[in-house]
Amino acid sequence: MPTARLPLGLSSFLLASAAGATALMLLAAGPTSAQEPTDPYVGFTAERARVQMTCEARFLDLPSSQTFREHLRIITSAPHPAGSEAQVEVGNYLTRVMRAAGLDVVRHTYDVYLPQLTDDVEAWIATPERIKLSNREPALPDDRFSHHPDLLNGWNAFSGTGDVTGEVVYANFGRREDYEALDSMGIDLAGRIVIARYGGNFRGYKVKFAEERGAAGVIMFNDPGFSREGAYPEGPMMNGETIQRGSVLTLPWTGDPLTPFEPALPVSGERGHVERLDPDDVAMPTIPVLPLGFLAAEQILSRMEGTEAPAGWRGGIETSYRITGGPELTVRVRVNQPRALTRAVNVVGTVVGSEYPDEWIILGAHYDPWGFGAIDPNGGTAMLLTLAEALGELADTGCRPRRSILIAHWDAEEAGIIGSTEWVEEFIDPLTVNTVAYINADAAVSGPNFGGSSSPSLKGPILDVLDDVTYPGDDRSVLDWWREEGGGSELGNLGGGSDHVAFYTHAGVPSAGLSSGAPSGVYHSNYDNFAWFERFGDTDFVFGPMLTRIDGLVALRLANADVLPYDATRYATDTRVHVETLLRVAEERRVEVDLSRLVDATEALEAAAERFTGARDRSLEGDAAALAHPVAQRTNRVLRRLEKAWLDDGGLQDRPWSRNLYVSPDPFSGYASWMLPGVRFEIETDDPAEVPEWEAKYLRAIERLTALLDEATALLAG
């Protein structure tokens, strides 16, 4: 196992310390010059920083490659999609491991509306000849997992049920602009089968836009791009029969389709009662949808005889890409997909805080895959179990965190981010009052390439941690490696598509997603398994422990700081960048807007952030810091409200569940992040008359944020 890099000055501090001394004993002995942190941790008094350094040194030695590997091997020993018996067993394993580590474990159950697991899907070329198209990855001699009897055909959750036959229209990526291009060409989709390649947007929008135009069904396929090198099992990338499964649900809310804004409590009434919508009143897809690999798709595309597609619509399949197939070519799509209430179980373990147990730092990932899920999601699951064990052992040595750290494993994410959303809706009150941060770990570990996205307030703390953890097999920190070798520079902005969505866009909890990945073409396929992982992913099982150290240090610093170390200045600097982006989008769309008031507001916000940062740092100076405990607590209560300044009870346009004015998933693609989305929506829909009203909402939000920073400054200044 690689040696973890210690913060500057910490190695000599440990050498001078007695073996096995507790943090309190070290404090009583008093510091030596070698023990002083060269750069005290943000938000910590010098005294607290010395304790933190001792505990971090212990923590960094705890995660092991062997532990991470064994957890991943056990979790991915069988396919375990949501609703399966195998998923129940995985949930039981997560419970046992965290309880054995000393965490308080609670299993939160919900009855959610899910498609039932089914093999009953098929695609055919119906005319001029009848050909059944392959829709399951074949077993491979080099992949012992691909023979498992419980693997399923390729299917899309929340497809409509039906058996349809029609002519074919190719829609490129099935993006909004692609369908608009078909409209401009005069292509009628009514009664036809749309075939679209994956990429460019969330798959659900490919279906939504097709159904709105009267299409009878949709086929989606993996396009190999312009290189077929490294195809599985010889390499890590897709082969011609790799199939991407996935949900096609697109609703104005995230989570259970039948209980927006409310948790989908069990029908037994053991935790209360919730009114459920009638499924017939919810706009779920009604047309049949299924996915194929590119060899099956090639059977269709190679027989199409219509007008050639534009150059930008042509992919890597060795055929002419054409817009229409002609009347002689028809394709049949048949899907039988019943839906029913299904039990979902979130497993949440807590390292209870020693001083502020009701204040939460949450780290989570879903544990339901489409098949085995070694990459997605269970690289993150195994990492979180490794972290739970390390935190439990750390607490046993006298380094229990001051605030509670929760390790959460969410169910039913793949169907629509359901398990985490229901939990957020159930615990919305403590989340909006006492929660410090949420760190997402969906598919977080599969190889050497670090990356991350974050809300502004967490960027500084995360970058500090990246500079204090060693990259495996290298003398550099993860931060240095990332910037010098990994092509990274700054943390990005969170978009959609995973369990942070409810925390960030609905509850207003500062959130981040950190990962270490590898090139892969087996996304949501039956080949995402332990055989792929040990050959092409984290082959030495060192990046799971690396990310355990990163996520763990972020959590411990947030849990133990005297004053929460939020990066206050980022709110202003990032917002100003996002305003500039809106102006560029407006220029590209030839929409005239004036956002000068927003720019001015960010300048006032930046000044308030600088005042707060100075007051915070002064209050923490020296061994005998002037910061009194009640003042710190009142200040932290104010700081936890910072992200909530962006919340608007009315939500965004046509999306009242999405309350965060600062960020949302792109409503036309699903995955990408939209910053300042209320204004951007009006620009993207060419409606500048509504921009001033939305700009006024943003000005009020920034004013609230500025006032909160000034309130925190006044508290610290005494």
Image (cartoon, rainbow, N blue to C red):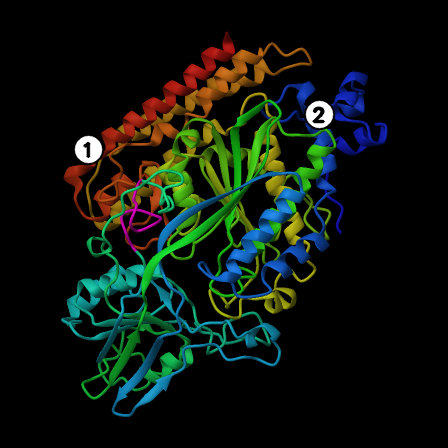
Q: What's under tag 1, amino acid-wise?
A: Pro
**Residue 618 visible, this orientation:** yes
Q: What element carries label 1?
A: helix
490 vs 502, left or right, is right
Residue drawn at x 41%, y 26% is: 642
The residue that label 2 is drawn on is: 51
Which class describes the residues within 10 Å of circle 1: few (<14), some (14-19), or many (20+)? some
Q: Is residue 92 above or below residue 334?
A: above
170 vs 534, left or right, is left
Q: Where in the figure is residue 44, as x and y percent of width and height?
A: 62, 22
Q: Is the magenta stretch mostly helix, strand or loop?
A: loop
> What whole-number distance in Å separates the C-alpha atoms at marks 2 and 1?
51 Å
Magenta region, residue range: 250-261
Residue 569 is a magenta residue: no
Residue 692 marker = 1
- Mark earlier in primary sequence (2, 1): 2
Q: Is residue 497 above or below residue 643?
A: below
Report the front residue among 410 and 181.
410
Q: What element carries label 2?
A: helix
Can you tell which quarter of the image residue 8 is in? top right
Judged from this view, the residue extending furthest toward the top is 718
Q: Where in the figure is residue 224, as x and y percent of width and height?
A: 44, 73
Report the front residue among 620 and 423.
423
Residue 284 marker = none
Q: How many labels does the image show?
A: 2
| Residues at discs 2 and 1 in contact (Cβ within 8 Å) | no
Q: What's under tag 2, amino acid-wise?
A: Val
Residue drawn at x 20%, y 70% is: 215
